[in-house]
Image (cartoon, rainbow, N blue to C red):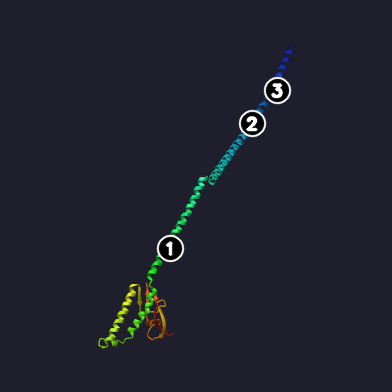
């Protein structure tokens, strides 16, 4: 009886050890698989989260870019597309600018015309007697020549030739009155004796070399010159000293 009891006790211990070993081997793989599963799932979830976040960022940037492009396109379209009223205002402004430019040009032309007309009127008034005065210059030259050709001794105080003296006085007074009349109308005479020859004012009839005098100097005046309002009416006819070179 004791042998049977020992045998059954041994069997029970063996069976118990086998069950514990089986239970331990069965429990260990489950825990390892579970940790591996959760680790893989966590990595997958983290990767998916990052991909999702990057996708959302890219979608947000694309949306912002698209919105900006659309806004710029809309503004450009608004800038280029104008309403009929705005186009009419632009056309009116352009027309007004053209009319203003034409008006200013017309006013400038009118002012230039007015100035030219005033100048022509003044010149006509100033030089109206130019031809008439020029015709009378010969008369003044004849009177001057008559006075020069009278001998000085015949008109001196000691001379008894009273008729010649009276004639000389009358001719001189006539010439002086004619010159004063010329002057009242802007015609003045000038005598260039001993002056430097000026081709704008003088007409050289002859040249003579004269020692002791500067070449180009007027030494003889055959006819005095006349000017009207600063313009040469007739140049003086003179003789000029010729150079010795």
User: Residue at label 3?
Assistant: 22
**Left or right of 99: which side holds 160?**
left
Q: Are marks 2 and 1 in contact (CB under 8 Å)?
A: no
Residue found at x 69% / y 24%: 26
- Tell me if residue 205 comes above or below residue 79 in the rendering: below
Viewport quadrant of the C terminus: bottom left
Q: Which mark is residue 180?
A: none
User: Residue at label 2?
Assistant: 41
At mark 2, the secondary structure is helix
Disc 2 crowd, CA 10 A, few/some/many (<14, 14-19, 20+)? few
- Tell me if residue 10 comes above or below residue 48 in the rendering: above
Residue found at x 30% / y 81%: 172
User: Residue at label 1?
Assistant: 113
Residue placed most toward the observer, 30 or 128: 128
Q: Earlier in the sequence, mark 1 or mark 3?
A: 3
At mark 3, the secondary structure is helix
Determine the CA span between mark 2 and mark 1.
Answer: 101 Å
Determine the CA span between mark 1 and mark 3.
Answer: 130 Å
Disc 1 crowd, CA 10 A, few/some/many (<14, 14-19, 20+)? few
Determine the CA span between mark 3 and mark 2.
Answer: 29 Å
The image position of residue 66, as x and y in percent, is 58, 41
The image position of residue 21, as x and y in percent, is 70, 23
Whether residue 121 is visible to the viewer of this picture, yes or no, is yes
- Tell me if residue 134 comes above or below residue 208 in the rendering: above
């Amino acid at each position: 009886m004791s042998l049977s009891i020992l045998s059954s006790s041994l069997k029970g211990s063996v069976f118990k050890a086998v069950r514990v070993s089986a239970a331990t081997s069965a429990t260990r793989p489950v825990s390892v698989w579970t940790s591996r599963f959760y680790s893989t799932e966590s990595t997958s979830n983290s990767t998916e989260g990052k991909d999702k976040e990057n996708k959302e960022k890219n979608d947000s940037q694309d949306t912002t870019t698209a919105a900006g492009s659309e806004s710029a396109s809309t503004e450009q379209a608004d800038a280029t597309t104008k309403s009929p009223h705005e186009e009419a205002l632009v056309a009116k402004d352009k027309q007004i600018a053209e009319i203003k430019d034409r008006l200013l040009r017309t006013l400038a032309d009118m002012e230039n015309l007015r100035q030219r007309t005033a100048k022509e009127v003044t010149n006509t008034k100033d030089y109206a007697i130019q031809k008439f005065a020029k015709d009378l210059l010969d008369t003044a030259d004849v009177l001057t020549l008559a006075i020069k050709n009278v001998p000085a001794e015949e008109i001196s105080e000691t001379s008894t030739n009273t008729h010649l003296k009276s004639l000389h006085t009358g001719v001189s007074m006539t010439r002086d009155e004619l010159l004063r009349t010329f002057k009242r109308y802007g015609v003045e005479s000038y005598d260039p004796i001993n002056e430097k020859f000026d081709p704008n004012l003088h007409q050289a009839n002859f040249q003579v070399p004269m020692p002791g005098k500067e070449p180009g100097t007027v030494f003889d005046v055959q006819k005095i010159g006349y000017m009207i309002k600063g313009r040469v009416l007739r140049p003086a006819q003179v003789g000029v000293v010729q150079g010795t070179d």
